[in-house]
Amino acid sequence: MLLLLTNTFTLPPQITSYEKENKVYKYKKNALSYKWGRYDIPVDATWGTVDFVHGLCYGTFKNHVNSHHLYQQAAERLFTREIIYRW
């Protein structure tokens, strides 16, 4: 017996508007709008996490260099073989 599997993955619904201060605004796509399938989410999430924490803690790292070293070691562990392979 041949079993045929189909792709049941569907794209998320389109966002057409958003609410702010009890007003509804239409969402307009531009060059900076997210494009589904353009980015690799696990890789971008990993880099985003590293970049965010580094930027947030930069002032602390300036005064405590050893903290930066510990952070770098922890951040390197986020880049598993699977992430590096995808990248």
Image: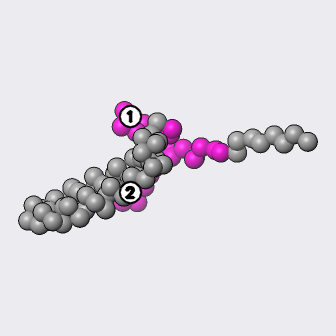
- Is 12 inside the magenta-drawn segment? yes
Q: Residues within 10 Å of mark 2 (few under 14, many from 20)?
A: some
Q: Is residue 36 above or below residue 49?
A: above
Question: Is 28 left or right of 70, judged from the image as shown?
Answer: right
Q: Main secondary structure of the magenta part?
A: loop
Question: Is 45 left or right of 55, judged from the image as shown?
Answer: right
Q: Report the quarter where the C terminus lies.
A: top left
Q: Residue furthest left?
A: 63
Q: Residue at horizontal 34%, vertical 49%?
A: 47
* Foreground pick, 34 / 18: 34
How many discs mark residues in the rendered view? 2
- Disc nearest the viewer among 1 and 2: 2
Which segment is the magenta one? Answer: 9-37
Residue 75 in view in this figure: yes
Helix, strand or loop status at disc 2: helix
Residue occupied by mark 2: 78
Question: Is 16 left or right of 78, judged from the image as shown?
Answer: right
Q: Residues within 10 Å of mark 1 (few under 14, many from 20)?
A: few
